[in-house]
């Protein structure tokens, strides 16, 4: 993580594009049930267009409509 990337308490921002971010969180690692609940909660927001998780490593990719949900509000 570089100095321009903010630090967060429960996750690390791994990758970011204009309308997509990938986070890594130990909270979801090897916990599919918690991960599915997290996905469901994210998908309830109309601004979020897709959520993909890899529970083995605690990774979540979130695609969103940046015109309706600024990245700073998502994080």
Image: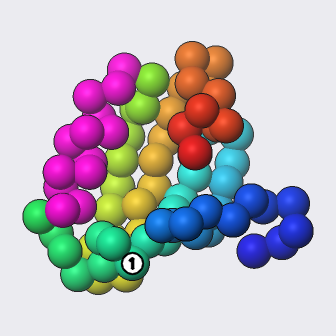
Q: Nearer the viewer, residue 65 or 27?
A: 27
Residue bearing mark 1: 26
The residue at 64%/28% (across/down) is 70
Secondary structure of the magenta portion, mostly?
A: helix
Tell me residue 56's x, y (percent): 29, 82
Q: Residue furthest left?
A: 33
Q: Is residue 48 magenta?
A: no
Indicate the quadrant containing the N terminus: top left, top right, bottom left or bottom right: bottom right
Indicate the quadrant containing the C terminus: top left, top right, bottom left or bottom right: top right
Span of residues in magenta: 34-46
Tell me residue 21's x, y (percent): 57, 52
The residue at 74%/59% (across/down) is 6
Which quarter of the figure has residue 74? top right
The residue at 51%/33% (across/down) is 64
Assess disc 1: are there few (<14), some (14-19) or many (≥20) residues with their C-alpha within 10 Å of its C-alpha: some
Give the vertical position of 59 relative to 37 (above or below). below
What colour scheme governs how the chains and residues are painted in the rendered image of this protein?
A: rainbow
Which quarter of the figure has residue 32? bottom left
Give the vertical position of 74 relative to 15 (above or below). above
Q: Residue furthest top?
A: 68
Give the vertical position of 37 relative to 15 (above or below). above
Tell me residue 53's x, y (percent): 33, 62
The residue at 35%/26% (across/down) is 45
Q: Residue furthest front?
A: 9
Q: Nearer the viewer, residue 27 or 18?
A: 27
Mark 1 element type: loop
Tell me residue 49's x, y (percent): 40, 32
């Amino acid at each position: 993580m570089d100095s321009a990337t903010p630090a967060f308490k429960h996750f690390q921002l791994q990758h970011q594009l204009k309308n997509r971010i990938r986070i890594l969180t130990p909270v979801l690692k090897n916990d599919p049930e918690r991960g599915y609940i997290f996905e469901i909660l994210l998908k309830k927001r109309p601004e979020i267009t897709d959520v993909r998780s890899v529970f083995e490593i605690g990774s979540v990719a979130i695609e969103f409509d940046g015109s309706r949900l600024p990245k700073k509000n998502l994080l």
